[in-house]
Every structure is written in structure tokens, then in C-alpha cells.
Amino acid sequence: MTVKNGSCNNSNSDLPSDRQLTDECQPAAGSSKISNEDEVEAESDMMRSPVGSQDFEVVDDQLLMHEELNDDTCDNFKSIYTTLTHEKGLPSQNYMCRGCSSPIGTIYGKFKVCAFDSRYYCARCHSDDEAVVPAYVVNNWDFTPMKVSCAAKVFLVEMENEPMIDFDVINNNLYEYIAPLRLMYDKRKRLKYAANYLFACSEASANEVRSRLWPKDYVLTNLHLYSMQDLLQLQTGYLQSH
Ligand SMILES: [Zn+2]
């Protein structure tokens, strides 16, 4: 795995606040203008275009060629994990690739926009990998895979099983509009009630419950907590039947 060991450990304290989400929420990456419109328009179209698969893909060899994500990149990616980002234009990056600092734009060459962080990358650091972007899921229940940078792809694959999404903090309005999410909340409440009963019975019963739920035992401690893999399985109906 290319994510640096220890640098991307999940912590719920890293989840963005409501205020952070509200401040940074914009309609979508690609909605603002940047300097080289002709060049970025084609890239933005590619970034937004849906593809058939809605599951995370295994990191391919090309992706593994890229350097490890450093701590700053991991911290930054975690801070925007569920935030809808927006483009700020090439001047905000001094016409340099966000990944490797190579010159991009104007006479220097093509660039691509990452749907995860809305930053600009060179062709080496953005090879049109696709991923479901958490921010679009938790804000719009949109599971359309989008074009992301190589670093974002590595990060999102690494984080897909981590319980990073707390709907009680991020967007509990979705319970009102997304029936599967609401039903899963009711199911978790019943599960927690049953587990509490078993916990009171004996230590052996408690251990049995924990072992059956592991590694998703967080469903008992926080009814609103999900990983991206949970949400992908919820959207396909898999989670409801298991
Ligand atoms: Zn680059």
C-alpha cells in the first residue's frame, strides 16, 4: 500500500465540523471559472462523467508507481473527506501541479482537475483514476464515480473501510430523504438494544457479539457512523441483507 504507515490512521476527531462543511460547500467542482477555459472544460467533463462500476477498484500498477502520501497530504485529505470542494483557479497554485509542483497551464502543458480536492494536477499525477467521492455521497447521495488524482485515489481506497462518516455531525437531513439510510438507523437501534441485553447476560455472550460484529463494532457505539464501504453496500442493498 502506498499510504505511508501511520500517517492516515482514522480518527473521528478529524471529521469536519458543520461550520466547515457549510463554509466550503459549493455546488460542484467545475462550477467556477479558471483562466484556461478551453483546456479545463474538456478535463472537467471527463472528471464528471459517470462510469459503470460503483465500487472502489483495486489500486493498479500505474497508481503504485507514485510516491507515498506524506503526512500533510493525508491530513489535508482527511480534513476535506466529506466536504464539497470547489476550484480556485490555476493562479491559486501558481500554475504548479498540486502533486509534484511541475508547471501546468498556459504554455506549460495540460492539467486535470481532481473531483476530490478540486485542485489541479499534471498528467503524471492525475491519470483519470475514478472513485466515488465521499462528499457527493453524504451531501447528495450521489455515488457516481469521478475522476480523481492518483494521490486521492490511493487515499480513498485506503480509507474505504474506515468509519469516517458520522451523519449526526455531517448531514442528518439525509435520514429524512434516503429511505435505506433511515431503515438502517432503525435496524442499528434494534441491534444495539439486543446487544445490550446480551452484554448483560454474560461476558461470553458479550464477546460473541463483539466477535460477530468485528471490525464493524462501531455500529454499537455510534448509530450514525459509516465507512464508505458501508454506504456503497447500503446503496446496492447488500448491507441490509447482512
Ligand atoms: Zn504532477
Image: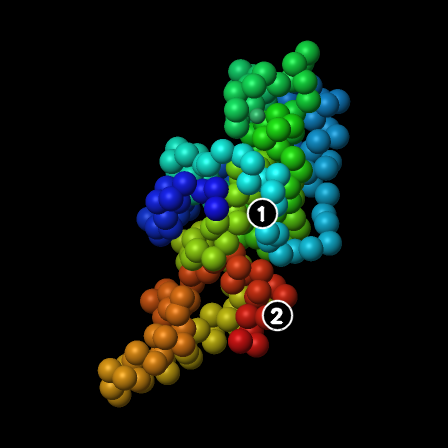
Residue type at mark 2 is Gly
Residue at the image point whose x is 41% and y is 41% from the top: 4
Q: Residues within 10 Å of mark 2 (few under 14, many from 20)?
A: few
Q: Which residue is denoted by mark 1 in the rendering?
A: 59
Find out whether the residues at labels 1 and 2 contact each other: C-beta distance under 8 Å. no
Single out the residue that lies furthest toward the bottom: 201
Q: In the visual, does 8 lie left or right of 104?
A: left
Residue at the image point whose x is 58% and y is 47% from the top: 59
- Between 102 and 141, the one lying in front of the other is 102
Q: Residue 173 placed where, x, y %?
A: 51, 58
Q: Residues within 10 Å of mark 1 (few under 14, many from 20)?
A: some
Question: Taking the image as four quarters, which one is ligand 1 found in?
Answer: top right
Report the Cα–Cα distance between label 1 and label 2. Answer: 25 Å
* Snapshot quadrant of residue 76: top left
Q: Residue 166 placed where, x, y %?
A: 42, 56
Say if 221 sits above or below 24 in the image. below
Q: In the visual, does 33 lie left or right of 176?
A: right
Residue at disc 1, secondary structure: loop
Say if 68 sits above or below 103 in the image. below
Residue at the image point whose x is 60% and y is 42% from the top: 61
Residue type at mark 1 is Val
Q: Which residue is denoted by mark 2 in the rendering?
A: 237
Ranked by sequence position, the earlier of labels 1 and 2 is: 1
